[in-house]
Image (cartoon, rainbow, N blue to C red):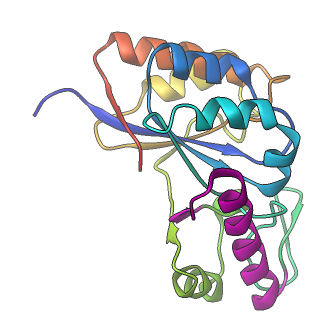
Amino acid sequence: RGPPTIALTFDACGGRADNRILDVLIGEHVPATIFVTGSWLRRNPEALARLRSRPGLFQIENHGHRHLPAIDRPAVVYGLKAAGSPAAVAAEIELGRNDVKAATGRLPGWYRGAAALYSRTSLDIVAHLGQRLAGHSIAADGGAQLSRSAARRRMLSARDGEVLLMHINHPERPSGQGVAEAIVELRSKGYRFVRL
């Protein structure tokens, strides 16, 4: 009962912060969970400062150290070279966790690997390292590859209880504008937003 409730989660893989999205989240007071890599943290100190200045709004979590898919054998997924071994998967998660702690002063509780794909062994490693695995029900911006209108439509299709995955590291792509517009529209329709 009550308004539809959804969780907005964003991956910050590398690249730059998409301030179109960040400005709307802050301006509309929309809580979100942001999964950051060590490389994104190093490249975006201003965006990190904005996130940290609103701890009740943003939850900063682990997206790995170098954005390597948490697959324990040699593979290429969506053009990304996988970690490739159990030891490399563990290092990707642990170093990413340390990156978040160094940047925020707190250890992250959630982990989402690059490409959000995992091998069976990797799932065990995530659990052994005390991280909770964050999934999603809608890949709302199609890996930041969708058009503005397609990303907007996909977000507006969200139903109660959905966990949406978007990207907040591609200001040069049109999908981010569609994400920003959809957040405002969902808010106006009475949706309630929660962090993980």
Q: Inspect this view and state whether residue 153 appears.
A: yes
Q: Position of residue 45 (x, y in %)?
A: 80, 37
Q: Name which quarter of the figure residue 125 lies in.
A: bottom right
Q: Position of residue 44 (x, y in %)?
A: 82, 37
Answer above or below: position of 1 versus 147.
Answer: below
Identified at 86% across, 47% down, the residue is 42
Q: Position of residue 76 (x, y in %)?
A: 87, 68
Q: Position of residue 153 (x, y in %)?
A: 52, 21
Q: Inspect this view and state whether residue 63 appears.
A: no
Magenta stretch prevailing secondary structure: helix
State the extent of the magenta-drawn residues as a range: 84-111
Identified at 50% across, 58% down, the residue is 135
Where is the N terminus found, in terms of image quarters?
Answer: top left
- Whether residue 3 is in magenta: the answer is no
Is residue 13 shown left or right of residue 29?
A: right
Identified at 56% across, 13% down, the residue is 181
Identified at 74% across, 26% down, the residue is 18
Is residue 74 shown left or right of residue 20?
A: right
Camera-side residue of 128 and 7: 128
- Whether residue 94 is in magenta: the answer is yes
Answer above or below: position of 187 versus 194.
Answer: above
Q: Name which quarter of the figure residue 22 lies in.
A: top right
Camera-side residue of 74 and 14: 14
